[in-house]
Amino acid sequence: MKKKIENANLCGDLYKLKTSHICAISSVGRAPHLHWEGRGFKSLIAHIIMDKFPENREFRIVGSASEENKKHFQEDLRRRLYSRAEYLDEEIKSSEILKSPEQIEIINTVNDILSEYVAQFNIEYYPLPVDNYHIIKTEVYKQKVGANSLASFSNKDLVVFVQEKLARQSDLFFAALVLHETLHYAAYIAYGAVDNPDNPNQYKIGMYRAGTASSSYYGKTGHAHFEGLGEAIVTELQKEVFAILVDHPKMKEIRDIYDDPKYDDKKGGVTSPGEWKSEELISENGEHFDIPYGKNREVLDYICSEIFEENQDVFADKRAVLREFFSAHFSGRLLAIAHLVEGAFGKGSFRILGNMKEDSESGQLHLEQFRKSRLNFKKTK
Ligand SMILES: [Zn+2]
């Protein structure tokens, strides 16, 4: 089977240094696999790998494909997850930069922390192997992964790609990016599969769900929803978990940078355990790293405030409402947040939230729309 790395960037995140970030690449749906996958000898290898990793992650696969083809794809996903060398594109392989011991430590610590963190949402976390993180030379990254992002998680290949430039800049930035992208992996992920009408041994795959984001997996365009909300949730999660990460004993060097008093007025502060308040990171060399998706997060924050106002008997504070959105990201269950949104903004408002894209213009439009909806809702109550 031929690898299609140009399709790998199902999720890219645009982080822009020193200026506010602009539009990001679709997390799901816009790049469905347009080639046919097929059943073949690799199934045998998959069984050996499955025996080696009895507890590995199962993904939901929906769609009209036959059970055999779905099973084949499930095995294929396991190989992508646990047998990276077999899958890596030659050009990417030759442009890969070896990870430093500190970077390996960061990846392992992120996975250790997420195993514990995700458990509070009654979700089992399967660590993403270190081999599934690739630091790629900047020019190859731009060509093969995405021109507009610094790091990305591929739902298709179950790998995190980080641009060399950023990985070299600062361990602090590297940790923030690795955490963000690993949170995309930690999400509820489901695929859709349809059989080739001309050959029952072949099937086509697309994304169906990635956290709260959803897309139609058939057709050429892949219509996607809840992408803006998805990135807002992931980035708020990133802020919360980053506070735990920089406090971890293994992250002493990161902690030392963060504790340097010369950055005190810039960085906000970490209350431990708790919220990471800063909207930017500053490296040991004084470079700035903005926390992305500001407008999308403003929408989420506004929605959580108003839901809290509407449900003060149920939630202790606004943060408790935000946790319902975190929970939806990991479980894939949208019903609870749909009820909460519609209970504060009226019928149909959750569907409108689904139209928010990742760019700040879309964020601003939705912020205005939700303010209006809230006023109307209060008037007619
Ligand atoms: Zn993201």
Image: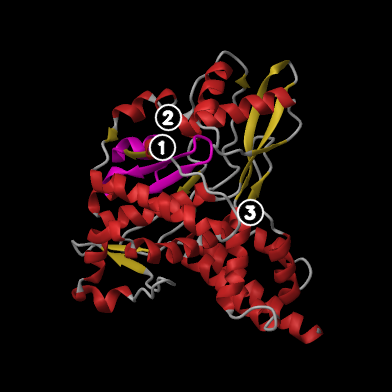
**Numbered disc 2: secondary structure:** helix
Give yes or no for contact between labels 1 and 2 (Cβ–Cβ under 8 Å).
yes
Region of the chain picked out in magenta, as a range: 136-165
Quarter in which the C terminus is drawn: bottom right
Counting from the top left corner in percent of width and height, residue 315 is at 64, 78
In depth, the one of 45 and 359 nearer the eye is: 45
How many residues crowd around disc 3 within 10 Å: few (fewer than 14), some, or many (20 or more)?
some
Q: What residue type is disc 3 on?
A: Ser
Query: Which numbered marker is on residue 84?
Result: 2
How far apart are labels 1 and 2 at the CA level? 6 Å
Q: CA distance from mark 2 to mark 3?
A: 26 Å
Which residue position is annotated with label 3?
331
Mark 1 or mark 3, earlier in chain: 1
Q: Which residue of the protein is positioned furthest toward the top in this rendering?
A: 41
Kindly identify the amino acid type of the residue bearing the numbered disc 2: Arg
Point 56% across, 16% down: residue: 44
